[in-house]
Image: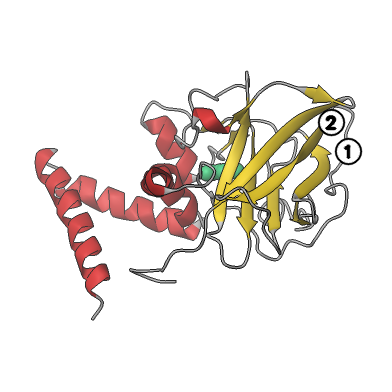
Amino acid sequence: MNERVKVVVEAVVASVQAALVDKQVTELEYRTAVRYLMKIAEERETALLCDVFFNSTVVATKARTSQGSTPAIEGPYYRDDAPFVGERLKTYDTDDHKPLLIKGTVRGADGNLVDGVTIDVWHSTPDGKYSGFHDNIPTDFYRGKLRVGAGGGFRVLTTMPVPYQIPNKGPTGALLEIMGGHSWRPAHVHFKVKAPGFETLTTQYYFEGGDWVSDDCCHGVDSRLVIPDAVEDGARVMNIDFVIEPAHAQSGVGA
Ligand code: MBD
Ligand code: FE
C-alpha cells in the first residue's frame, strides 16, 4: 500500500469523473477516447501526450519553491546515454545552418562554485527532429554532456535549433489540431544540470523574437527563459548563469 499513490490517483480519477459528468460524455465518446489512447500508446506517444498537457503544471509547482534557476519542462526526448562532448556538438552542417554558442556558469544558490557539475544539452536538428528518437539520427548528434570547468564555466558550439512541430501525422499533434490549436513549440535548447548534493535542474531556454515564443503548444515558456538576441564571434549566443539548489529530502512516489 502506497498512501501517496492512493491520494494522487483518487484525485485524478475524481477530476476526470467530474469532467465526464459536466460534459455529459456519451458511451460512444468514451469508447472513441479509449481507442485514441490505445493509438497514442501504439505510436509510442504516451510520454509526448502527457508532456504536452501536464509537464508544465508539475514544473510550475517546483518553480514556486526553487531557490535556483527557473525550471522548465523536460519533454520526451532526453537521453541519459549521450556522450561527453568537447567544444562542439556533432551536427549535420547544411547550407542554412546557423552557429549557436552556448556558454555560461554554474553556481550554487549561495553563490559559491559547485564541484562535479555536468550539464546535459540537447536540441532538435534544423528540421525539427531529435537524435536517438527520430530518423535513426545517432544519439551523439545534437546532444551531449558538458563538464563544467574549475572556474564554474562551460562553453559549447552547435547549430541553431528551429521551432519544433510535434508531428501532426501522429495522434498527439492531430489531437491538438482537432481542438483548433496548433502543435508548434518555439525553438529551444534543453538542459539538465547535475551535481552531487544538489537538486538536478531541468530546464530549457528560448530565443527572443522567435516564432511561437508567446504561443507554445506545451505552455513551457517563462519570460526568464527567453535569451536576448545577441551575437558573439559570428554566432548567436545563449549565455546562461545557472543557479542550482542544495538537495532536499525526497518524499512521495518514486525516487
Ligand atoms: C519537445 O521537443 C519538447 O521539448 C516538449 C516539451 C514536448 C514535445 C517536444
Ligand atoms: Fe524539445
Disc 2: CA contacts within 10 A as few (<14), some (14-19) or many (>=20): some
The location of residue 110, given as percent across then percent down, is 56, 50
Give how far across and how far down residue 96 sits, in percent: 85, 27
Q: Residues within 10 Å of mark 1 (few under 14, many from 20)?
A: few
Residue at horizontal 80%, vertical 36%?
101
Quadrant in the picture for residue 83: bottom right
Q: Which mark is residue 83?
A: none
Q: For the residues marked 2 and 1, what is the alpha-carbon distance in whole angstroms?
A: 6 Å
Q: Secondary structure at mark 2?
A: loop
Q: Nearer the viewer, residue 36 or 195?
A: 195
Q: Is residue 47 left or right of residue 110?
A: left
Q: Position of residue 197 (x, y in %)?
A: 57, 67
Q: Is residue 90 above or below residue 220?
A: below
Q: Do the residues bearing badges 2 and 1 touch, measured as CB atoms within 8 Å?
A: yes
User: Is any atom of residue 69 visible in this view?
Assistant: yes
Q: How has the structure been colored for display?
A: secondary structure
Of the numbered discs in the image, which one, if any, rests on residue 97? 2
Describe the element under mark 1 as helix, strand or loop: loop
Quadrant of the frame with the N terminus: bottom left
Q: Amino acid at mark 1?
A: Asp
Quadrant position of the C terminus in the picture: bottom left
Q: Which residue is mark 1?
A: 93
Give left or right: position of 42 versus 163.
Answer: left
Q: Three-letter amino acid code at disc 2?
A: His
Can residue 130 be seen at all in this image of the molecule?
A: no
Residue for point 50% across, 63% down = 247
**Residue 114 vertical position relative to residue 162 in the rendered view, above or below:** below
**For disc 2, does the CB lie below 8 Å from ligand 2?**
no
Q: How many marks?
A: 2
Residue 93, percent from left and from top: 88, 38
Q: Is residue 88 shown left or right of residue 202?
A: right
Q: Quadrant of ligand 1?
A: top right
